[in-house]
Image: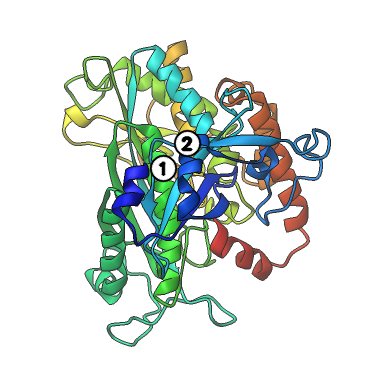
Amino acid sequence: MKNWLRKHPEVRTIRVAAADLNGQPRGKRIPTRFADKVVEDGTRFPMSVLNLDIWGEDIEDSPLVFESGDRDGVLKPTERGFTPMPWLSSATALLPIWMFREDGRPYEADPRQALRAVLDRYKARGLTPVVAVELEFFLIDDSGRNLQIPISPRSGKRRKAAETLSIRALDSFDSFFTDLYDACEEMDIPADTAISEAGLGQFEINLMHCDDALRAADDAWLFKMLVKGLARSHGFAASFMAKPYEDYAGSGLHTHFSVLDQDGNNIFDDGGPKGTDTLRHAVAGCLNAMADSTLVFAPHWNSYDRMVPGAHAPTGISWAYENRTAAIRIPSGNHKARRIEHRLAGGDVNPYLMLAAILGAALTGIEDGIEPPDPITGNAYALDLPQVPNTWGAAIDAFEQSEIIKRIYSEELIRNFILTKRQELHYMAELTPTERVEIYLDTV
């Protein structure tokens, strides 16, 4: 890590940052001449910092604050090392960090540590998840009273229409996307295909599959920071909030995953289109945990505006082969790449908590050897299916009362997340819809 800075003498300051429960980067700005100390010894800040609400406020009832004396955690660099921050005007590097206790044990309420704990369970069984994510986001002109699509730098026009898979829509913001892909190269984020989506000024970029789920979550977390920061340097906003426009579909964050055994074989591949028994067990685990883990996939007030029937977001708990109305889709294609697509999450999620929820749920199904119901056919919205919670409060209750969630996350993370969401629910209820959009637009 020290060598990276020596090879980049133009970098004069660094940021050290960890993801809190909302996925917000929390940390410090440090002059480069003091960076060696951070690399060697880490840094410190209160454990409560990873448990702030969406406004960055302390959680009022949290035992991490006054009850414990607001004690410090130890933050150490992740294996990612330094990465550039191309959206800033001055040369700057980010050093991702994660939290440990004073005695060196991982702090399990750190979202990245929560994902690590799930992956350790896979590793103990000789298994390795392979993960890819698809991130949807909006480009937005938020300079006026109402949100709207930005004026195209190429045409000087504002086209107020959804343009699904439109090359013209991509070309309208070609300079932004060119800079975005260049920045992804600098940051070693494996950005693949870009498309325009069904929402107003909505786009999707896929990140390539990765056999290190921690790195895949890092990529998604960094990508969200990059897109939002780079958009501002182009004179508009980018947002991953679930649904900024009432009349258009919202943004999802779909996850594809398979699992390899110790010999590198895909344990979901049976040589045909259906997949193995293990695939079905993983599907069953995901379905069983879906209602209880909805709070992770829809963590904010605005999240539930997206999850309505017929709006390209699943509401019923079901699975299917090659059917995008189902919450769990088994894509067609080469059997060697047989995988599960989990479609419930919105773009506003914490990628670490999301992957922990998905992979943890799948592993419970594999461990228990449970069978899913029959796959559906046709329009899932038209079927009588068990439903995910349709309000934020109901999702908080389901998460709090769940036995499955206790198999995925630590007791402390569960407690902290519930306290955070109950506090946010209370204060969000006092705001107008416009005020809520102002909060979510730049944060999530």
Q: Secondary structure at mark 1?
A: helix
On screen, residue 318 above or below 177: above
Name the mark on residue 40.
2
Dot placed on the residue nearer the N-terminal end, 2 or 1: 2
Residue 21: x and y in percent read 60, 42
- Position of 190 compared to 367: left or right? left
Neighbourhood count class around disc 1 (C-alpha, 10 Å): few under 14, some 14–19, many 20 upward:
many
Residue 356, how many percent across, how many down? Answer: 49, 31
**Residue reaching furthest front?**
33
Q: Which residue is labeled 1 in the image?
A: 218
Quarter holding the N terminus is top left
Q: Nearer the viewer, residue 376 or 400?
A: 400
In the rendered structure, which amino acid carries the disc numbered 2? Glu
State whether residue 228 appears in this view.
yes
Residue 353, position as x, y percentages in the image? 52, 37
Tell whether label 1 touches label 2 (CB within 8 Å).
no
Q: Quarter holding the C terminus?
A: bottom right
The reply to whether residue 312 is in sight is no
Going by the numbered disc 1, the residue's amino acid type is Asp
Q: Nearer the viewer, residue 8 or 401?
A: 8
> In this rendering, would 385 be left or right of 160?
right
Relative to 397, 136 lies left or right = left
C-alpha span from label 2 to label 1: 21 Å
Picture quadrant of residue 169: bottom left
